[in-house]
Image (tube, helix red, strand yellow):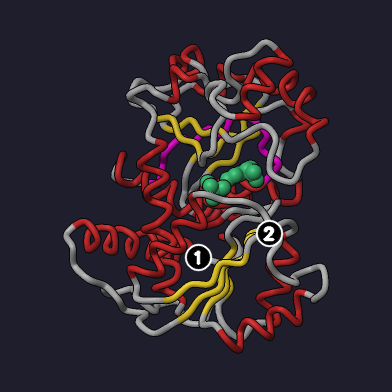
């Protein structure tokens, strides 16, 4: 394993902190670890270490990926759920960081503002990994990019179209990732859902060096022409008030990924989604929205979600292999 430990002691808080070469090496390491797992080759290279997982928001994929990856690497895990610790209520982030860093070899944090995970890292002497904040979801992007590489054999030059609310964690981090890796990124959304101008400017600067392009476009047809990857995310994210559903459904329905949208992209185009997804009415929230607004799906139709073009479950599996690489690289 050539790249294990190549980021020893570093935090993993956002992709802006990493060079394209480092991101590429993390993807290569993920691929190597994935092969080892598939071939039953043991890789307990972090034997005897302990990690803490702080989740101030709920999770299926990220939590399970950190746990399985940690066990495969030979580590022990403590999970702190959204209500079960003193964090933020009776104890500051700075104090929590210093306590946990004296007990653990690494700390994962999922929660609200990016400044919280940055503060945690500032006061922690062990690596801190961002498991999702309102602004960024960097481990998700590594999984997305590993999946794209497996599918297309490259990242460079891929036309990547993100449809929907592009101002939140997924839109932001995908734009940064595409800029770093020389991809053609399009945020296809109504203007008010475009990413923040400062982040767009920063990504355009990076893009100049890597050969990437960054486009913000309200028109679905123009955006999707020649697209290799169509990506979307939920229209209302964790922590947002329920009142915004009505406005989001109204604003973003024209940006739903449906068969007509897929037909505008390349014939070889794939559909991706970080999940969880409202592609039918088989969830509590999906059923409630179905009833209230007379709809059968939100950001993606069931037809596209279940189609041959959909690689969402390969993508979900890759969360584990890429999170394992982040831990193996930084510990
Ligand atoms: N994609 C993702 O982060 O999923 P979870 O919220 O289930 O962790
Ligand atoms: N934007 C979503 C991503 C979930 C993985 C959220 O923050 O809820």
Query: For mark 2, does the 10 Å Cα neighbourhood hold few (<14), some (14 to 19), or many (20 or more) residues?
Result: some
User: Can residue 179 be seen here?
Assistant: no
Q: Label 2: state its secondary structure.
A: loop
Residue at 50% over, 51% down? 140
Query: For mark 1, does the 10 Å Cα neighbourhood hold few (<14), some (14 to 19), or many (20 or more) residues?
Result: few
User: Can residue 188 be seen here?
Assistant: yes
Name the residue furthest front. 84
Q: Position of residue 259 (x, y in %)?
A: 46, 14
Q: Is mark 1 within 8 Å of ligand 1?
A: no
Q: Nearer the viewer, mark 2 or mark 1?
A: 2
Q: Label 1: state its secondary structure.
A: loop
The answer to whether 227 is drawn above or below residue 35 in the figure is above
Label placed on residue 169: none
Q: Quadrant of residue 215?
A: top right
Magenta: main secondary structure: loop
Residue at 75% over, 51% down? 198
Compare residues 207 and 167 and report the one nearer the observer.
167
Residue receiving disc 2: 82
The answer to whether 213 is drawn above or below residue 330 in the figure is above
Upstream in sequence: badge 2 or badge 1 = 1
How far apart are the alpha carbons under marks 2 and 1?
Answer: 33 Å
Q: Which residues are magenta?
A: 155-168
Residue receiving disc 1: 19
Q: Is mark 2 within 8 Å of ligand 1?
A: no
Lateral position of residue 185 relative to residue 325, left or right: right
The answer to whether 240 is drawn above or below residue 321 in the figure is above
Name the residue furthest bottom. 102
């Amino acid at each position: 394993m050539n790249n294990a430990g190549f980021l020893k002691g570093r935090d993993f808080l956002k992709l802006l902190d990493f060079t394209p070469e480092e991101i590429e090496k993390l993807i290569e390491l993920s691929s190597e670890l994935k092969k080892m797992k598939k071939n039953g080759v043991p890789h307990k290279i972090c034997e005897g270490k302990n990690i803490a997982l702080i989740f101030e928001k709920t999770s299926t994929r990220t939590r399970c990926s950190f746990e399985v990856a940690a066990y495969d690497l030979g580590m022990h895990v403590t999970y702190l759920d959204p209500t079960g610790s003193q964090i933020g209520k009776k104890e500051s982030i700075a104090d929590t960081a210093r306590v946990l860093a004296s007990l653990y070899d690494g700390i994962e944090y999922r929660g609200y503002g990016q400044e919280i995970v940055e503060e945690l890292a500032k006061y922690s002497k062990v690596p801190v990994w961002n498991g999702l904040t309102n602004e960024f979801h960097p481990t998700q992007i590594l999984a997305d990019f590993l999946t794209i590489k497996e599918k297309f054999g490259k990242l460079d030059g891929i036309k990547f179209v993100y449809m929907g609310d592009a101002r939140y964690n997924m839109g932001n981090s995908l734009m940064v990732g595409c800029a770093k890796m020389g991809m053609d990124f399009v945020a296809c959304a109504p203007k008010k859902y475009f990413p923040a101008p400062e982040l767009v400017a920063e990504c355009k600067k990076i893009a100049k060096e890597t050969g990437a392009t960054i486009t913000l476009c309200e028109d679905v047809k123009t955006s999707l022409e020649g697209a290799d990857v169509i990506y979307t995310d939920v229209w209302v994210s964790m922590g947002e008030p329920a009142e915004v559903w009505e406005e989001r459904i109204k604003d973003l329905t024209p940006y739903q990924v449906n068969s007509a949208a897929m037909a505008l992209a390349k014939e070889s185009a794939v559909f991706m989604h970080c999940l969880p997804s409202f592609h039918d009415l088989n969830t509590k929230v999906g059923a409630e929205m179905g009833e209230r607004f007379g709809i059968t799906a939100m950001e993606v139709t069931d037809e596209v979600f279940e189609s041959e073009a959909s690689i969402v479950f390969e993508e979900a599996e890759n969360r584990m292999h890429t999170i394992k690489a982040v831990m193996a690289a930084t510990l």
